Amino acid sequence: MGKVLAAALVGIAAALAAERLLAFRNRLNATREVDPVALPNCRLIKGIEAGSEDIDILPNGLAFISSGLKYPGLKSFAPDKPGEIFLMDLNEKKPKASELRISRGFDFGSFNPHGISTYIDKDDTVYLFVVNHPHQKSTVELFKFMEEDNALVHLKTIRHDLLTSVNDVVAVGPDSFYATNDHYFSDFILMFLEMYLGLTWSNVVYYSPKEVKEVAAGFYSANGINISPDKKYIYIADIFDHNVHVMEKHADWNLTHVKVLRIQNILAEQPTVTRVYAENGSVLQGTSVATVYNRKLLIGTVFHRALYCEL
């Protein structure tokens, strides 16, 4: 009887493991095939070789690009090189990427930039928020952009117990922001188990010098985050659930769920979205961001190169 029970338990465990593996593969889109959609005027951006994980464009056409992310379990083309922030002026006829200098006193050697966000203050000062992973920890670095010097002045490093595994930020003030934690755990093995088991423990945190709190939770992996043009709604991409959550922002900075956007029927005669570019990895690997300014498209990647296209 004991042997029969043991065999049954083994069978149940194997079935559960197989179900989790299939669900994990589906969340990763491991078997998805991509039908190419080409644009006629595209070129790889010279000088960006080791990632362009996030891009933020100011209203005047200046684009900030974070590069050099080293993330546990992901390939890096420059494992020993510190991260960089690049700047492109999209008003130029042939925009080029130039590395921004960072002020003295900042630990540039451990700079490992991830998501970024800009904020323009009432006096037109431009602040750049950068998610950083020095020594595989999570911080948010606050810089002031000095356009005339092509430089960033480091103002402060932000750490907090609720900012455990930060992926992206969206600035809502000169020293306040919303941040996504893409995992509950920070240890790589526990992060993998979290993904494999399909735990919905990822969250969104609001930070200001006066208050830090969780404002949304229950995500498989809260990843990219942005704000609507009217500043009333926050958009949160759950990468493993393949959808975007629309959250209403309130006066106390809390967020409430409004609806979820999911890309469907992409090949139908009247699809819900328009696919302007797609390829199978021969040009870009691991695309993480795309943004448009005046019919100019920038596409970034986690650890690979960046693409500039004219629409």
Image (cartoon, helix red, strand yellow):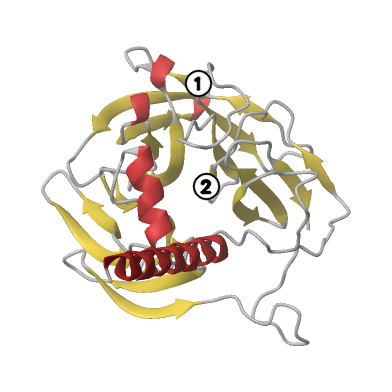
Q: Is residue 233 above or below residue 174?
A: below
Please report the residue visible at 59 percent of the width from the left and 38 percent of the height from the top.
52
Write down the residue under mark 1. 149
x and y, in percent, of residue 131 in the image: 38, 38
Instruction: Give the residue at the far bottom of this rendering.
Output: 269
Q: Is residue 81 above or below residue 129?
A: above
Secondary structure of the residue carrying numbered label 1: helix
The disc labelled 2 sits on which kind of residue? Leu
- Mark 2 or mark 1, earlier in chain: 2
Please report the residue visible at 77 percent of the width from the left and 38 percent of the height from the top.
44
Write down the residue under mark 2. 58
x and y, in percent, of residue 207 in the image: 22, 49
x and y, in percent, of residue 296 in the image: 71, 52
- Binning the other alpha carbons within 10 Å of mark 1 as few (below 14), some (14 to 19) or many (20 upward) gives few
Q: Are marks 2 and 1 in contact (CB under 8 Å)?
A: no
Judged left or right of residue 191, residue 275 is right
Secondary structure of the residue carrying numbered label 2: loop
Q: Is residue 61 visible?
A: yes
**Of 234 and 280, the residue lying toward us:** 280
The disc labelled 1 sits on which kind of residue? Asp
